[in-house]
């Protein structure tokens, strides 16, 4: 799942409604701000009553947003939809602001100014957060990487109607797709429908997605000169300007979830981002990146250091927008040797967690739990024991007992093998039950070792989820009965 970069808007605070931030008459803001807010709200409500193409703001509090959704070509002041499916580093663009977008922006800004994480529905299911922090849970929480995806018929219906790019860059659609698995399976977490590639244009690398072709960088990096010419300094980036649509998606999704599950915000890790900056239309980014670090180690570290700073800013902004947990995906860490992993991936992963939590504290925000997924790097699990991460997500090749031994103070996540979803119900339930038994029911979050695939049967995903819940409840019940019995005979 992917999304475009944003288009530039005037440098006003993100809490200020987009109708004002986009106004060309911004020099009059001190005089007319309050009046503009009232006028826009009244005008928007009146027009919504007679404009069938503008969704009523009340839809934001309903279970779904389908039916009347449309994207705004040209954006809302925070995104640009290019018709050739290329997402570029934003330049000059003064988008048209529709009534619908104005009202949506007013809704998104309804949370208390200066009161991050305020103004949202009360969280009714905090199993995920308790498990992440190592607190007791009555059963194992469960969710799945890429759970908002093409295996769901209702997902495909919306995606085919709107096109993937429109889904990525339209906050209402992204929110609806994010919530679909919560409504179908009552998952214990929602993860924002977005993609790690949204950061590439902010780094200076444009990317393109064509049907049947893996997304690729239009101006892929291949030499130190490319890096010096292309890379945008993360310290100069205004993320509210460049990726405002992502943060708006976070806020709308938090409201749409209505406390049914925590919302996870995520980012790709620096190494994985580097591989995609080198993935051209006719060249493989994984191969190119491995060659690049051997030829140009200093330039590689320049990209990684810059990406680390960008990821930190991005994750902090997601928490400010409403994310309740964070996950960092190093999807391509496994292509590195153990020695190279310790040079080109691990240091940046560790620094991200430290800087994100430190940055949140500096802003007076309680740090949220953080998960790291160093896919394919079971050889280095122990390196995360003393990190700022709360959870380590495991791929399919990691033995739970080994992980518990190397990460005694961390909660674990994973690592069901998705291939079993193609099997029969008895096999799915057997494998899911055995997985829970191996991990234990405390300090554990059930997930896949990788992700849901397009060909997975939704009904069989439900079997997996149901078995995780029933097995963990049975284990906890038995343990409680044994403890009670022992106490009675003491």
Image: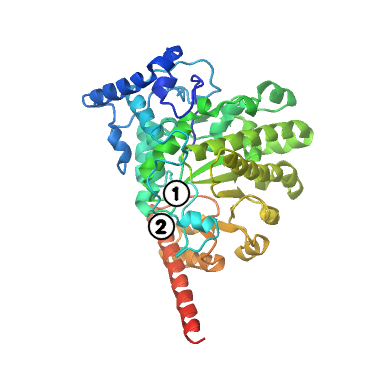
Q: Residue at x 57, y 48 (%)?
A: 370
Residue 73 drawn at (x, y percent): 40, 22
Residue 87 drawn at (x, y percent): 52, 25
* Mark 2 residue crowding within 10 angstroms, few (<14) / some (14–19) / many (20+): some
Instruction: Answer above or below: position of 258 versus 478.
Output: above
What is the distance, in whole Å, between disc 1 and disc 2 at their CAs? 24 Å
* Residue 77, picture quadrant: top left
The local secondary structure at tag 1 comes to loop
Tag in front: 1 or 2: 1
Q: Residue at x 66, y 39 (%)?
A: 271
Residue 11 drawn at (x, y percent): 51, 21
Label drawn at residue 460: 2
Instruction: Answer above or below: position of 483 versus 36.
Output: below
The local secondary structure at tag 2 comes to helix
Relative placement, left or right, of 236 versus 128 is right
* Residue 154, picture quadrant: top left
Instruction: Answer above or below: position of 426 versus 296.
Output: below
Sequence-wise first label, 1 or 2: 1
Q: Is residue 329 visible?
A: yes
Label drawn at residue 262: 1
């Amino acid at each position: 799942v992917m999304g475009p970069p944003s288009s530039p808007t005037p440098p006003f605070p993100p809490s200020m409604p987009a109708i004002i931030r986009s106004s060309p008459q911004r020099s009059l803001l001190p005089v007319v701000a309050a009046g503009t807010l009232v006028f826009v709200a009244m005008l928007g409500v009146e027009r919504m009553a007679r404009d069938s193409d503008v969704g009523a703001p009340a839809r934001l509090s309903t279970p779904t947003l389908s039916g009347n959704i449309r994207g705004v070509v040209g954006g809302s002041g925070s995104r640009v939809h290019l018709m050739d499916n290329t997402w570029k580093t934003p330049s000059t663009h003064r988008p048209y602001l529709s009534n619908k977008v104005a009202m949506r922006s007013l809704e998104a800004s309804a949370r208390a100014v200066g009161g991050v994480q305020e103004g949202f529905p009360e969280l009714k299911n905090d199993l995920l957060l308790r498990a992440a922090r190592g607190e007791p849970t009555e059963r194992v929480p469960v969710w799945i990487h890429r759970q908002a995806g093409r295996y769901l018929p209702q997902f495909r219906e919306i995606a085919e109607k709107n096109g993937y790019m429109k889904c990525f860059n339209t906050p209402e659609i992204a929110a609806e797709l994010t919530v679909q698995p919560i409504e179908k399976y009552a998952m214990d977490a929602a993860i924002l429908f977005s993609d790690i590639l949204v950061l590439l244009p902010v780094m200076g690398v444009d990317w393109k997605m064509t049907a049947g072709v893996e997304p690729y960088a239009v101006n892929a990096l291949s030499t130190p000169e490319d890096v010096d010419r292309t890379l945008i300094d993360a310290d100069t980036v205004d993320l509210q300007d460049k990726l405002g649509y992502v943060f708006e998606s976070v806020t709308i999704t938090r409201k749409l979830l209505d406390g049914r599950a925590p919302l996870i915000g995520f980012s790709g890790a620096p190494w994985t981002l580097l591989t995609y900056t080198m993935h051209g239309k006719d060249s493989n980014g994984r191969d190119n990146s491995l060659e690049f670090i051997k030829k140009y180690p200093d330039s590689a570290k320049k990209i990684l250091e810059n990406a680390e700073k960008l990821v930190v800013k991005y994750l902090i902004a997601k928490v400010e927008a409403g994310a309740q947990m964070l996950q960092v995906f190093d999807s391509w860490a496994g292509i590195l040797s153990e020695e190279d992993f310790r040079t080109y991936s691990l240091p940046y992963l560790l620094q991200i967690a430290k800087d994100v939590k430190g940055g949140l504290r500096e802003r007076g925000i309680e740090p949220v739990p953080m998960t790291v997924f160093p896919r394919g790097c079971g050889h280095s699990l122990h390196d995360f024991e003393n990190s700022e991460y709360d959870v380590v997500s495991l791929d399919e090749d990691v033995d739970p007992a080994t992980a518990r031994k190397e990460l005694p103070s961390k909660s674990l996540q994973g690592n069901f093998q998705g291939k079993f979803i193609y099997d029969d119900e008895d096999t799915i339930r057997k494998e899911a039950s055995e997985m829970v038994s191996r991990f234990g029911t405390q300090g554990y979050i059930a997930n896949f070792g990788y992700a849901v695939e397009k060909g997975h049967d939704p009904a069989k995903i439900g079997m997996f989820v149901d078995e995780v819940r029933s097995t963990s409840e049975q284990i906890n019940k038995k343990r409680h009965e044994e403890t009670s019995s022992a106490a009675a005979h003491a």
